[in-house]
Structures are given as structure tokens and as C-alpha cells.
Image: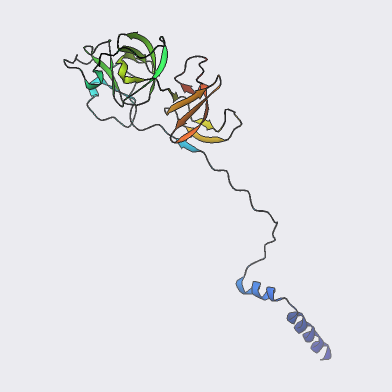
């Protein structure tokens, strides 16, 4: 009996000496987590992907009065449109002479949202295509008075009025998704990613990189990932 009494006394003393923290832990069922003194590293933010604007780049002349489709047209030969008797609004001339001093071939960009591409250097020639992408880079192949023969990335050629072009430079992203980097260095941080078909305004170009702006993002892209530059062209 004495031995049993002593054992009960030892158990009671052990319970009374238990820290209050043990009781609180038992009440909420939580387990203590040791602190390492450091916070886990945050996950790197995924770069924003900039997609090309919806709508086609150019429409067949037979469909110039119809709204643009969501998908680009298939590269097939267009049906020749009948010659128009009156000059369209974007073919009107103010009688001014060409403003370019650079000999063809060289690059420019489309000025308005709608540009008629004709089969010859006159408003009397039929419209073959209608470009519906403002800022699209094109290559000027030849000049005739106030008309310019141009070629786009797909190889489509035709004539446009000089007022439909601007000297402001742009490039077209080609291939797959391309990285837009903070500096002209392959190890530099990625600012955004540009999908094929994105038109980007150009600020500067060196032999390996171009500083561009697209979708509200500005950075450097490898010049081999874009179309709209002359070989070895430098844009200061």
C-alpha cells in the first residue's frame, strides 16, 4: 500500500511540473515547428507573353469590304479585282515628291490601318491585297514617282502610295516565342516573351541585338528572331 501511494505521488508531481505551454499545445492539437531563422525563397515571376493582335495581316482584294477574320489568310494567289474608276481614299496624292532619300531596297512601315496593295504604280491598277496591320514592316523594292513597290514577310509584292509608308522602323517577330531581355545579353533577365507575328517598334539595333517595344514592354531581342532589317544594319 505504501509503495502504491508513493507511485501516485510521483505521477502527481510530474503533472504539476509540466510547462503551461504543454497544456496549451494539447488544447489546440498543434505541434511546435522549429524555426530555422530564414524565409523560403520566393518563386520567380513568369515572364509576360505578348501575343500578336487578333485579325489577319492582309485580306484578299475580293474581301476588302468584309471585316477581318480572327485567323490569318492562307497564302494563296488572290483573285484579281476589277480596276476601280475612282481613286480610293488612301491613294489620293497631294502632288508632293517622294520624301525618302535612301535608295531601294530598304525597309519602312505601314502608316495607316488599311493600305491597298496594287498590281502597278497607279490608282488605275487593280487592288490585289488590302493590308490591315498598322506598323507592319515592309521592304521597299523600287520607286516610281509617288509609288513604292513593297514586299512583306510572306513575299507578297505590290505597289502602294508613298503616303501609306512611314520611316518609323518596326520588326516582325518570327519563329516561336522569343525572349525580350532587359539588356543585350543572353544572360540578362527576361522582361517578356513575344509570340511569332508580334509587331514591335524599334529604337536601336547593333549587329546582334535590337531594342524594341511591344505590348507595353521594352527590352532587347536577338536580331535573328525578327524580320524587317537590312543585313548588318545598325540603327543608332
Please state if 104 lies on the left or on the right of 36 as rendered. left
Is 125 above or below relative to 50? above
Which residue reaches farthest bottom? 1
The spot of residue 162 in percent (x, y) is 31, 16
| Residue occupying the point 25% across, 13% down | 95
Please name the colour scheme applied to the rendered image.
rainbow
Which residue reaches farthest right? 3
Q: Nearer the viewer, residue 101 or 201?
A: 101
How many callouts does the rendering have?
0
Is 44 above or below relative to 186? below
Q: Is residue 79 visible?
A: no
Which residue reaches farthest left? 85
| Residue occupying the point 68% across, 73% down | 21
Is 225 above or below relative to 101? below
The spot of residue 68 in percent (x, y) is 28, 29
Q: Is residue 65 visible?
A: yes
Q: Nearer the viewer, residue 236 or 180?
A: 236
Please state if 89 lies on the left or on the right of 151 as rendered. left
The spot of residue 173 in percent (x, y) is 45, 26
| Residue occupying the point 79% across, 83% down | 10
Please state if 4 lies on the left or on the right of 174 as rendered. right
| Image quadrant in which the N terminus is located | bottom right
Q: Nearer the viewer, residue 1 or 67?
A: 67
Is 224 above or below relative to 7? above
The spot of residue 36 in percent (x, y) is 70, 56
Please state if 98 lies on the left or on the right of 22 as rendered. left
Amino acid at each position: 500500500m505504501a509503495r502504491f501511494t508513493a507511485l501516485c505521488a510521483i505521477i502527481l508531481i510530474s503533472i504539476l511540473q509540466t510547462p503551461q505551454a504543454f497544456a496549451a499545445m494539447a488544447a489546440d492539437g498543434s505541434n511546435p515547428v522549429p524555426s530555422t531563422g530564414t524565409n523560403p525563397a520566393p518563386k520567380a515571376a513568369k515572364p509576360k507573353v505578348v501575343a500578336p493582335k487578333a485579325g489577319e495581316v492582309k485580306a484578299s482584294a475580293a474581301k476588302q469590304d468584309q471585316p477581318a477574320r480572327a485567323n490569318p489568310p492562307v497564302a494563296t494567289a488572290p483573285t484579281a479585282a476589277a480596276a476601280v474608276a475612282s481613286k480610293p481614299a488612301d491613294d489620293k496624292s497631294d502632288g508632293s515628291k517622294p520624301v525618302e532619300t535612301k535608295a531601294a531596297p530598304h525597309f519602312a512601315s505601314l502608316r495607316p490601318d488599311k493600305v491597298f496593295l496594287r498590281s502597278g504604280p497607279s490608282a488605275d491598277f487593280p487592288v490585289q491585297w488590302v493590308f490591315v496591320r498598322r506598323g507592319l514592316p515592309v521592304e521597299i523594292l523600287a520607286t516610281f514617282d509617288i509609288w513604292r513597290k513593297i514586299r512583306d514577310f510572306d513575299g507578297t509584292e505590290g505597289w502602294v502610295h508613298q503616303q501609306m509608308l512611314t520611316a518609323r522602323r518596326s520588326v516582325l517577330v518570327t519563329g516561336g516565342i522569343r525572349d525580350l531581355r532587359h539588356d543585350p545579353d543572353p544572360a540578362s533577365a527576361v522582361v517578356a516573351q513575344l509570340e511569332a507575328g508580334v509587331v514591335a517598334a524599334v529604337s536601336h539595333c547593333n549587329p546582334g541585338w535590337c531594342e524594341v517595344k511591344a505590348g507595353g514592354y521594352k527590352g532587347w531581342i536577338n536580331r535573328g528572331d525578327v524580320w524587317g532589317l537590312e543585313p548588318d544594319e545598325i540603327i543608332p
